[in-house]
Image: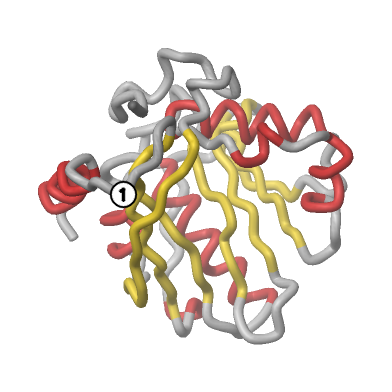
């Protein structure tokens, strides 16, 4: 799906009449790669780039990654839960939090869940502010796909939505992901209750 089609989907979402007050209309695409071992790993743009697993990450470090990368795309779910609720979601051995560094600075991350016996899932994938458009995202995504294949020879799934960066869906498809399902839903606007600052996510109008 091209960016133009993506923009058309955003327009369609805002014409929906089934959206409760204070909620955002959202369209979600579910994608998968049946054989991630066949995806070629893109070369890092330079030698000062590395990907390191954060094992047993602290709450503070995880929230730094999640909040920094997700703020402009209105990631509110894990901001709303307490530290006590978050900790068991990020520390199991089946959760692989992989952080991309450039010159020692965190530049992006992916969170891979390998708990299921039938599939692996990239639950979160994002670049941090200031690192988009630098050639790092493609390298991180291809590395995430190959990393999942090295852990377990299973199909790899993820999802993206109409709140994400307009190129996200196309980037996933370029790396071999195929859409297997999609649906509409609604999500509370995290800017209305102070979960996220009111001027974040300028590409998404405030909920009515």
Q: What residue lies at 62% left-to-right and 26% top-to-bottom?
A: 105
The residue beneath circle 1 is: 18
Left or right of residue 104: residue 56: right
Quarter of the image where one finds residue 196: top right
Question: Circle 1 — which element?
Answer: loop
Left or right of residue 30: residue 5: left
Left or right of residue 148: residue 63: right
Left or right of residue 147: residue 8: left
Quadrant assignment for the N terminus: bottom left
Image height of 159 relative to 199, above or below: below
Q: Which residue is at the front of the view, 45 or 160?
A: 160
Where does residue 202 sit, x and y in percent of width and height? 32, 21
Image height of 47 relative to 194, above or below: below
Q: What residue lies at 30% left-to-right and 64% top-to-bottom?
A: 173
Quarter of the image where one finds residue 63: top right
Where does residue 189 sit, x and y in percent of width and height? 46, 31
Badge 1: how crowded within 10 Å, few (<14), some, or many (20+)?
few
Where does residue 4 sit, x and y in percent of width and height? 11, 47
Q: Which residue is at the front of the view, 112 or 183?
A: 183
Image height of 105 relative to 48, above or below: above
Q: Which residue is at the front of the view, 5 or 153?
A: 5
Q: What residue lies at 47% left-to-right and 83% top-to-bottom?
A: 35
Can see residue 46?
Answer: yes
Q: What residue lies at 53% left-to-right and 40% top-to-bottom?
A: 47
């Amino acid at each position: 799906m091209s960016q133009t089609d993506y923009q058309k989907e955003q327009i369609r979402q805002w014409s929906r009449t089934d959206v409760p007050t204070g909620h955002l209309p959202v369209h979600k695409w579910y994608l998968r790669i049946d054989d991630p071992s066949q995806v070629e790993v893109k070369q890092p743009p330079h030698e000062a780039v590395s990907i390191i697993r954060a094992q047993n990450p602290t709450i503070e470090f995880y929230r730094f990654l999640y909040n920094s990368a997700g703020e402009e795309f209105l990631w509110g779910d894990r901001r709303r839960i307490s530290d006590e609720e978050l900790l068991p979601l990020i520390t199991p051995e089946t959760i692989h939090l992989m952080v991309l560094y450039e010159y020692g600075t965190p530049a992006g991350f992916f969170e891979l869940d390998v708990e299921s016996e039938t599939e692996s899932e990239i639950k979160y994938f994002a670049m941090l502010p200031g690192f988009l458009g630098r050639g790092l995202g493609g390298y991180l995504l291809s590395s995430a796909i190959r990393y999942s294949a090295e852990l377990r020879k299973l199909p790899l799934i993820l999802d993206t939505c109409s709140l994400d960066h307009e190129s996200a869906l196309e980037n996933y498809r370029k790396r071999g992901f195929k859409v297997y399902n999609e649906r509409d839903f609604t999500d509370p606007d995290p800017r209305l209750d102070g979960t996220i600052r009111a001027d974040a996510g300028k590409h998404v109008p405030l909920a009515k």
